[in-house]
Image (tube, rainbow, N blue to C red):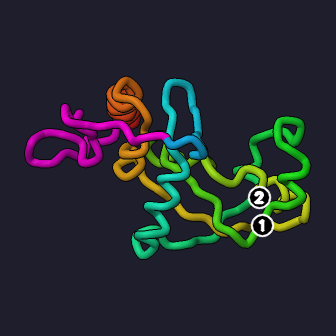
Amino acid sequence: MKKRRQNPAGEHPRQLKTDKTFTPISVDEDDELFPNGIFEFNVTKMLAFIEANADKFPVETVEVEPFRVYSSETLDEDTIRRADVSKPILLAEISPGRFNVIDGNHRVERAGRDGLKTIPARRIGAEQHLAFLTSVRAYETYVSYWNSKLDELE
């Protein structure tokens, strides 16, 4: 049995606490959103934040195949053909230690078709991407979801 890692307050170090003053990120007309069930992230504003703080989100190289999860029938062929595989994809920590592509699925597909084994990527942890949820309900549900996943790890 794994021993629970706790801080002096008896909490898991990555446990999230609900901020009662949380304000959802605004959504402008042309913003790209990433829906994942009830969770909807404003990808446009997230990418702008990452670019403005690039030193905190270093580019790394990741393998293509584990992230090639969408069938090509669900992706737009023209977008795949135009995809710039030199531009980093964005991986968001959707549950503890598990990252999903939330920007760049067309690039991943193009890289796979071109026989590339790796692609550049940036990662954003849960603690950072919470700010880009588009509703209070999604935020509160995400905090609960995240903490339940931490409990499952123990």
- Element type at mark 2: helix
Report the amino acid beneath label 2.
Arg
Does the segment drawn in magenta span residue 21? yes
| Relative image position of residue 32 (x, y in whole percent) | 60, 45
Q: Residue at the location (80% across, 61% down)? A: 83
Q: Main secondary structure of the magenta part?
A: loop
Q: Is residue 148 visible?
A: no
Name the quarter where the C terminus is drawn: top left
Name the quarter where the N terminus is drawn: top left
Residue to which mark 2 is pinned: 107
| Relative image position of residue 64 (x, y in whole percent) | 74, 59
Report the amino acid beneath label 1.
Asp
For the image shown, how many numbered marks are present on the structure?
2
Circle 2 residues within 10 Å: few <14, some 14–19, many ≥20: many
**Viewed as shown, does residue 101 lie left or right of 53?**
right
Give the Cα separation between the discs numbered 2 and 1.
Answer: 6 Å
Which residue is more in the foreground, 122 or 8? 122
Q: Residue at the location (42% across, 41% down)? A: 26
Q: Residue at the location (76% across, 67% down)? A: 85
Q: Which mark is residue 84?
A: 1
Q: Residue at the location (34% across, 28% down)? A: 136
Residue 40, placed above or below residue 63: above
Does the segment drawn in magenta span residue 106? no
Contact (CB < 8 A) between labels 2 and 1? yes
Which residue is more in the foreground, 1 or 73? 73
Circle 1 residues within 10 Å: few <14, some 14–19, many ≥20: some
Residue 44, placed above or below residue 120: above
